[in-house]
């Protein structure tokens, strides 16, 4: 059944994550009647042209298109850093915006989106500082706007199973663990080389945050300190970045999580990356364990040509995150927890609008705030109110890695903040 409210969607950012997950997910929701007009904004027209020309997207979503901002007729190297604001200005209030620009632009972009009275879904990490997360939460609450953070691993069935069984006490209490996410080497050749520099981000902040969020999602334990060390290297364009990182996160109950990340999984390997989570837990006279091997989900393909990630022939193929598969309609549909996460966030925005559309302004605002507080409490969709430990961790991690792995404490009292241990 077509919902009463069918929001227009603006996607800000036309890069890899938009091509690989966001645009196909929104296209599918659009043809299901759950999304109205679709605009995609980028810094310049080049990535938008690549999205339009994508053979995979054309095959999966025949006849569907987005409005490009800047238009495709603009010169590919002509930059329009402010143009997305025009797309926002054209939206009616409380439609849906998805922010998918590089990490360091999330904060200013989110503020702009909220100032235009729009619900928003942001790719992780929401922002890079706790104070900014708090400010975003406050700005959104004032206007009764939903802010979701796209931590899609929360929607992986194995995460949901672990969360439920951990809460039931089936594992005991988390004590010692390790998480790993090594992204492919070929990432170094992408647009990453322009923004993944030592002063801006690092592998812990870029992908380690997924597992830090997941351990919090499963256990509810707050991180209280961390140390992150990096290994520097040069991108093909000469820019210096942290290409590898190793972090240690301490939790409120004394537990420790080691987090290994990098941009270096061999392109010729079966991957498409290397990732997983191992958690040992203490029970009464016994220990429990959670192990997720997230790169190898039991499906192996060997192609005739090197069409796997990184160009390899033999591949571990994950059917769980995101795949285009045949369905009852035209083309192919996105399946997996990546799609489900985006759909759930957009559905939350639509539900808020559906349930308040009939109310006068003031009661509608009050009810929108109540509905958002309910989502915050439920803790399934990541929001600034229920996932701010991630901003504390990211802020602490940046402080640690540029100080050669110094320990940084995360303080919850008397006010939330992070501080280098030796500076107390
Ligand atoms: N697993 C995940 O959740 C996941 C995976 C990949 C990336 N991400 C996140 O997504 C974000 C983008 O990553 P990516 O890999 O797509 O990067 P990318 O470099 O491929 O693309 C970035 C895009 O942002 C656009 N952009 C930059 N400034 C802009 C502006 N002022 N106005 C409009 N567009 C602008 C660029 O044109 C480009 O299209 C990052 O925050 C990253 O951490 C999340």
Image (spheres, grey):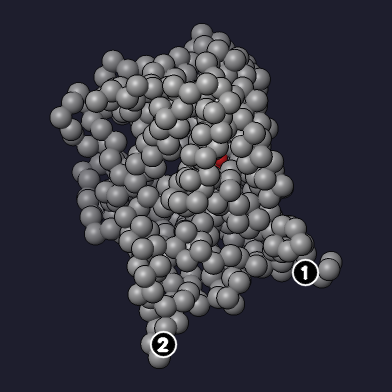
Give the answer, above or below, for where 206 lies relative to 175.
above
* Number of residue marks: 2
Can you give x and y, in whole percent of width and height, for residue 215 in the image? 48, 63
Answer with the quadrant where ligand 1 appears in the image: top right
Q: CA distance from mark 1 to mark 2?
A: 34 Å
In the image, what residue occupies the spot 32% across and 17% down?
Answer: 64
Which residue occupies the foreground of this view, 144 or 291? Answer: 144
- Dot 2 beta carbon under 8 Å from ligand 1: no
Can you give x and y, in whole percent of width and height, for residue 104 in the image? 65, 39
Q: Which mark is residue 284?
A: 2
Q: Quadrant of the C terminus?
A: bottom right
Residue bearing the label numbered 1: 421
Under circle 2, the secondary element is: loop
| Residue farthest along the bottom direction in this orientation | 285
Choose top left, top right, bottom left or bottom right for residue 344: top left
In the image, what residue occupies the spot 69% across and 62% down?
Answer: 412
In the image, what residue occupies the spot 68% across and 50% down?
Answer: 130
Q: Which mark is residue 24?
A: none
Graded by Cα atoms within 10 Å as few (under 14), some (14 to 19) or many (20 or more), the crowding at tag 2 reads: few
**Does residue 267 show up?**
no
Labels 1, 2: front one: 2
| Residue farthest along the top direction in this orientation | 73
Under circle 1, the secondary element is: helix
Can you give x and y, in whole percent of width and height, for residue 310 in the image? 39, 45
| Residue farthest along the right direction in this orientation | 423
Q: Would residue 66 appear left or right of 175 to someone viewing this image?
A: left
Which residue occupies the foreground of this view, 117 or 157? Answer: 117
């Amino acid at each position: 059944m077509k919902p009463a409210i069918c929001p227009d969607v603006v996607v800000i950012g036309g890069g890899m994550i938009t091509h690989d997950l966001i645009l196909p997910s929104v296209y599918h929701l659009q043809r299901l009647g759950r999304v109205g007009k679709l605009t995609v904004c980028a810094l310049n027209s080049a990535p938008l042209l690549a999205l339009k020309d994508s053979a995979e997207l054309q095959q999966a979503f025949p006849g569907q298109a987005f409005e490009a901002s800047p238009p495709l007729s603009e010169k590919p190297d002509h930059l329009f850093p402010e143009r997305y604001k025009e797309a926002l200005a054209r939206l009616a209030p409380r439609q849906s915006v998805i922010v998918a620009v590089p990490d360091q632009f999330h904060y200013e972009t989110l503020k702009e989106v909220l100032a235009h009275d729009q619900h928003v879904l942001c790719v992780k990490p929401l922002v890079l500082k706790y104070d900014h997360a708090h400010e975003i939460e406050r700005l959104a609450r004032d206007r009764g706007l939903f802010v979701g953070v796209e931590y899609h691993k929360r929607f992986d069935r194995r995460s949901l199973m672990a969360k439920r069984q951990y809460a039931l006490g089936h594992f005991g209490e988390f004590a010692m663990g390790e998480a790993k996410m090594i992204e492919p080497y070929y990432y170094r050749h992408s647009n990453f080389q322009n923004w993944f520099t030592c002063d801006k981000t690092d592998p812990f902040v870029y992908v380690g945050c997924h597992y830090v969020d997941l351990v919090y999602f499963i256990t509810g334990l707050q991180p209280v300190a961390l140390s992150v060390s990096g290994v520097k290297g040069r991108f093909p364009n000469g820019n210096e970045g942290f290409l590898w990182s190793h972090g240690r996160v301490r939790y409120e109950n004394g537990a420790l999580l080691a987090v290994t990340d990098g941009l270096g999984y061999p392109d010729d390997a079966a991957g498409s990356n290397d990732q997983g989570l191992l958690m040992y837990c203490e029970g009464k006279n016994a220990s429990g364990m959670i192990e997720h091997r997230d790169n190898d989900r039991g499906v192996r393909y060997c192609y005739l040509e090197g069409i796997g990630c990184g160009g390899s022939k033999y591949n571990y193929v994950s059917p769980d995150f995101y795949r285009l598969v045949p369905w009852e309609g035209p083309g192919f549909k996105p399946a997996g927890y990546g799609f489900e996460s985006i759909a759930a966030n957009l559905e939350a925005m639509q539900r808020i609008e559906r349930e308040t559309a009939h109310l006068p302004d003031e009661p509608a605002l009050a009810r929108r705030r109540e509905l958002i507080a309910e989502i915050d409490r439920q803790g399934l969709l990541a929001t600034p109110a229920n996932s701010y430990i991630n901003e504390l961790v990211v802020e602490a991690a940046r402080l640690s890695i540029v100080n050669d792995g110094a320990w940084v404490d995360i303080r919850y009292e008397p006010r939330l903040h992070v501080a280098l241990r030796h500076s107390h």
